[in-house]
Image: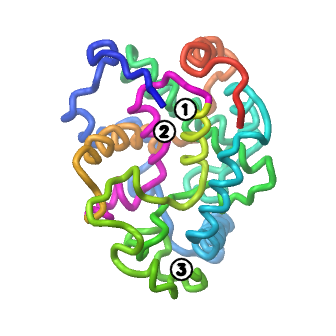
Amino acid sequence: MRFLIGEKDALHYIDPSELLRPEVTFAKKNLSHFRDYTEDKDDPLKERVKQTYKLMHTHQTVDFVNEKTQKWCQFNHFKATIKEALLRLNDLVDESDPDVDIPNIVHAFQTAERIRKDYPDLEWFHLTGLIHDVGKVLVFFNEPQWAVVGDTFVVGCDWSENIVYRHSSFVDNKDGKDPRYNTKYGVYEPNCGLDNLKLSWGHDEYLYRVLVHNKSTLPQEALRIIRYHSFYPWHSSGDYQHLMKEGDEETKKWILSFNKYDLYTKSAEVPDIEKLWPYYESLIDKYIPGVLEW
């Protein structure tokens, strides 16, 4: 598969020092209040999040990931434009998200518009912000949310320490008792690299595969942001370093840059989506045109 990367100047690359700077002055609440996974049985939102992760960490095994990859990567389930898929997110509230309880399409535009404000010339980055969660459309095709949303993690080796609810929610996952999968390296070789890891199945991997299959001309950086943006134990906690190889740190820089917009723009403020559609439709037509196979 050939990706249209473009010349460096044409992509307006962000300076690496800028990527690593945790500039989150646009956050609508105290930073310590984001991604709060403390348990509180009297808080319905926290209980919903906890139960979603419990189901995910019980059922996301090597066999399960292989099954879902085989099923969904035939791309013969439905056909839709990116806009049509995005519009479905108007009916989706992410059950794994402790920060907001609003339709996912609002979050999509919040993320995209803040990126657009800070990097007005980086149009592919704007579009990445808009579509990064479109893989959640799987929920509308009989996939439970625990198989679609939430943080991802590596299957096929021991679970890292910084996975959400690590020590309480994996007790019934059969891979923890399988000697092929419950060691530090499991089925992997040292420094095999990010792209050779099998992550828990979800919207990240699905949308990445859909874009590649449909020959999107988004740059490689965008595709990798989409594929790994939920891999928090790696990009935000520093886990799995023994499996990384040269080049993976550059991917992490891009994801950390994106992450501050994905995470800290979440609020109850709703952008004027109808007014914004013409701009984003022009980007869709440029990078991901027409009806896609899903």
Q: CA distance from mark 2 to mark 1?
A: 6 Å
Q: Which amino acid does the dot numbered 1 rest on?
A: Gln
In the picture, measured across the screen, residue 159 lies left or right of residue 95, that is left
Which of the numbered marks, if any, corresponds to residue 175? 3
Give the x, y percent position of residue 221: 38, 32
Instruction: Where is residue 99? Give x, y as percent.
Output: 55, 53
Q: Are marks 3 and 1 in contact (CB under 8 Å)?
A: no
Q: Are marks 2 and 1 in contact (CB under 8 Å)?
A: yes
Q: Residue 131: which quarter of the image?
A: top right
Depicted 231 relative to depicted 285: above or below: below
Task: Give the labeled residue for mark 1.
Answer: 110
Residue plotted at (42% across, 39% down): 224
Q: Nearer the viewer, residue 114 or 20?
A: 20
Secondary structure type for disc 3: helix
| Mark sitting earlier along the chain (3/2) | 3
In magenta, the rendered stretch is 214-241
Is residue 223 found inside the magenta-colored segment of the image? Answer: yes
Q: Amino acid at mark 3?
A: Asp
Label 2 element class? loop
